[in-house]
Amino acid sequence: MEQAGKPGSGQPEQGKSPSSSLNPQPSQSASPSGQDLQVDDAQVGRPLGPTPSQSRFQVDLVTEGSKEAAAQELQQQVDGVRHRGGSGSEEAKGRFRVNFVDPASPGGSSPENAGVDGGSGGVSFQNGDTVLSEGSLHSGGTGHHYHYDTHTNTYYLRTFGHNTIDAVPRIDYYRHTAADLGEKLLRPSLAELHDELDKEPFEDGFANGDEGTPTGDAVTNVADSKGVVKFGWIKGVLVRCMLNIWGVMLFIRLSWIVGQAGIGLTVVVIAMATVVTTITGLSTSAIATNGFVRGGGAYYLISRSLGPEFGGAIGLIFAFANAVAMAMYVVGFAETVVELLKENGALMVDEFNDIRIIGAITVVLLLGISVAGMEWEAKAQIVLLIILLLAIGDFFIGTVIPSEDKKPKGFFGYKAEIFSENFGPDFRGETFFSVFSIFFPAATGILAGANISGDLADPQHAIPRGTLLAILVTTVVYMGVAVSVGSCVVRDASGDVNSTLSATMTNCTTAACNLNYDFSSCGQDCKYGLIEDFQVMSMVSGFAPLITAGIFSATLSSALASLVSAPKVFQALCKDNIYPGLQMFAKGYGKNNEPLRGYLLTFIIALGFILIAELNLIAPIISNFFLASYALINFSVFHASLAKSPGWRPAFRYYNMWVSLVGALLCCGVMFVINWWAALLTYVIVIGLYIYVTYKKPDVNWGSSTQALTYLNALQHTIRLSGVEDHVKNFRPQCLVLIGAPNSRPALLHLVHAFTKNVGLMICGHVHMGPRRQAMKELLTDQARYQRWLIKNKTKAFYSPVHAEDLRDGAQYLMQAAGLGRMRPNTLVVGFKKNWSQCDMREVETYINLFHDAFDFQYGVVVIRLKEGLDISHLQGQEELLSSQEKSPGTKDVVVNVDYSKKAEAEASGPFASDSSPMMRKDEEDDGKTPTQPLLKKDSKGQGISLDTADQRLLDASLQFQKKQGKSTIDVWWLFDDGGLTLLIPYLITTKKKWRDCKIRVFIGGKINRIDHDRRAMATLLSKFRIDFSDIMVLGDINTKPKKENVAAFEEMIEPFRLREDEKEQEVADKMKEEEPWRITDNELELYKTKTHRQIRLNELLKEHSSTANVIVMSLPVARKGAVSSALYMAWIEALSKDLPPILLVRGNHQSVLTFYS
């Protein structure tokens, strides 16, 4: 009801803070428990939603009166008297009054101004503290100031849902923001119902992501809706469809079809065409009743069902087809007029040019009727329908009027002999399908009503009823005319009154002979009869000029319907901005939003084709365009039903998905029957437009069945995949990348993407830390924002944020819960913590524990290090920098602001780097979703800070994996067998286009006296794995002692982190180790001295052999959990990987990921 979800903005009362308050006011304490609600129906103009600075609700403590006071107030409410004050009241405990305040009402800031309105509409009791006028119960109600008391003493008088902030269901909550059928109201958001009362729960936005105020177009639509002309199902759909279906074919070709195919096959031809149109009508009805239908007809139905790609393709050709069809109908009219002029010797120039002149004049007159407005056009249609019905009636009346003058021309009235003779076919140069192709265009036109869906009062009701009834009526008339003319007129007649049967003729067996006429003298060259005379219906009719008027009516009504349909469909297409260059035609004029520009364009197209006058070539293409639309409408119903979307709930139940599929196939088949080359041309045009729209990627989301089916397929395949056991041949690295914000570490993202794109899963994990309330808001906004960013940057990955107390907890959540079924990560990827020696060592402890946790969860681990670093989040506006660097890699004069603030470092949400510093939000602006301020900005003086050399190198390094890698090497140091992940990753990298020229070099450890043997063994293994390599190097000197200066540098690096327990008392040393477990003990250092020297030596070998490699992939050393301190393990990784090209330290989970078995 109205008060339950009123979106009016609440203003604070005098002396009251804007936020919700629990402080009782003196005036409130004195008031009784029940408060009245004043509804002023005369007031209008309340805002449609709150502004960010306003609250829609105020919650205050109220007093709890005695039962006597409640009863006394109830009696006074019935008498229409406001009761103030309440003796015997005591302070309530835990009771709240919810004030709905609307500043638009006078005095609305004070609850004391509320009274009882006993005006028009009567008074009805809604609850114990509400008196509500009848007029405010509807969606357009204009009540402004409400008080709801949750006091339970008057529960027996309350209507459920009107004594709380929580809203009862109503239609206005489900409207689109720009709906023109009523206002959109905002239901209370979950935050308003759920958040703590001492906070402002709705300070940032509105429920469900909807805007608080409608767009300007919506306001205009509501304001102008009083003068809009809307049609019912008869005037808007039935009349239009019948006029469009009944065409010239009815009067000048149907008799010829009966002569060729016979009555029986003519009925079959009509039935086949009716089957196609009926199935399409059922499909149209299903789509039209599956939600509110706006203007655009076939385009709107298809685009909202199958998406903008098919909708955009069909919308363009459908509008064009209607424009050219108008030219065809006008030419048909002009030809009939010219025939009359020719008979009376009144030609103006010659037949050909007279058709052009009359056609041009006719188009101008029709344009004038259309531009005058839909009401005038509808009146013209009614007049034309009356003429058409009179013409049809004139024909049927003529069939029962005997006439001796008409017998020589083949008309004898209803005769069994003629019916029997004409029942079978007598094809003369035609076939069944050629006759069908000639008739079928006469059955089209069923979308004439749907095409003006925006001008219908109730499209959901009008389109099914009007369309299906029009198909039924026109089919019955077509069959009735076919049977009647076939029963009355013979196939051949000479027109000679002397063709009566002579006594000497004994071998005449035709129906005419039985009726005493012999037309055998003219053979098949007779000028009259069903086959030769196209004016049979005029001859049969009671009043021939009325048939001519019917021909005029049929052609002009079809032309007028096409002239109206084409601009309406084209306007809807342009409004959706599918083709940006056509945006100018979206503008409408007047209260009916008439597409005057579209009318003018349609007029120009039609006039052009009339002047060209080569319509025999165009006609089959136009018929195929209409059939393509029918096919896609049928396919839309099948597709939507197949997708099983919960949103597919048509009110029209008489459809079947398989019948719709058959209808779509029939339409495609009929296209080839009519004209095979026109069908192929139609397919090419539709596919071309589809590819164009797909390439352009219009920024629309209509909830199409394509989306629903994509989801359903993904769901079904994921469930099917979950029932399949993993196999080593199908292993894929599925990476959980702890990257923070995806745009903060582009090098990490691009390198992982190089071996997961189109191969495996990639999840960008982002751990949000800090206050829960703030983190929850960030999670919701970042989820949509960064997923769009990944898609926009063509990165095939998922963004998965979580909130946790620290990074380790968040990483554990992700490792346990990320993914779905078999689509779950199996490899943890992190960036190297470059600043580990300067940061808080508790962060290093957490960082190293990520590795231990990953191994516990049976994950592989990949650590990626670039000597320049990975994190560019401190560079505000880094996306502009990246784009500018891509365009001009040599540029050095980029100006940015650099933020090295403490806050940015403190709010780390990735592997200990400043991920939470302000990120570039340009992608949101491009998407048009949530506009925010760009962060590439200047300081208050307008001066930027020049990028220093280190940051410039960082930016260059961040882009290096986006460029094509030259003919260099990927060096694989496969020192320890981890199941093959160390070898698989570089192989996958080389399969990508940018890395295709890189060769793999493999380095292994071995003994000096067995180098050749080890090389051959590795070559054999690699060949069995079918992995190409350029060289294999066996390192026999790994265990050689490293250089003394390198050992000294290592000892100097770890010096600040040593415990030095020998220099301290045992108790002090133990306590220090307990408080700082990352400390390196002397015993530990001595125990792992050999392993330490190995890491230093390996770094020396790496610099010697792989300093020029593009990427190094190396086995990650493993530290035993609980035995090796975090500082020592971190020092090993530092010593191993420092001063090298980009390096990936890889350790699989020691399960085989490579196999040489087939």
Image: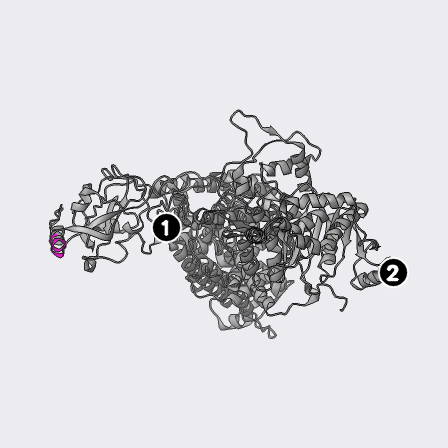
> Callout 1: 10 Å neighbours few (<14), some, many (20+)?
few
Whether residue 124 can be seen here: yes
Quick one: 1016 or 776, which is closer to the camera? 1016
Residue displayed at 21% across by 48% down = 37
Q: Circle 1 is placed at which residue position?
A: 195
Type of the residue with mark 1: Asp
Residue stretch rendered in magenta on the structure? 66-72
- Judged by its main secondary structure, the magenta piece is helix
Q: Circle 2 is placed at which residue position?
A: 1010
Q: Which quadrant of the view contains residue 257?
A: bottom right
Residue 1112, position in %: x, y? 74, 49
Q: Label 2, secondary structure: give it.
A: helix
How many tags in the picture?
Answer: 2
Residue 221, position in %: x, y? 38, 42
Residue 896, position in %: x, y? 59, 32
Alpha-carbon distance for marks 1 and 2?
A: 72 Å
- Marks 1 and 2: which is nearer the front? 2
Would residue 757 appear left or right of 898 to someone viewing this image? right
> Callout 2: 10 Å neighbours few (<14), some, many (20+)?
few
Whether residue 497 can be seen here: no
Residue 325, position in %: x, y? 54, 49
Residue 175 in magenta stretch = no
Residue 71 in magenta stretch = yes
Quick one: 21 or 173, which is closer to the camera? 21
Would residue 405 appear left or right of 28 to someone viewing this image? right
Classify 953 as above or below 240: above
Would residue 1114 appear left or right of 905 to someone viewing this image? right
Please say which color scheme the image uses.
Answer: one colour
Q: Label 1, secondary structure: give it.
A: loop
Quadrant where the C terminus sits is bottom right
| Residue that sits furthest to the front in the current view | 1065
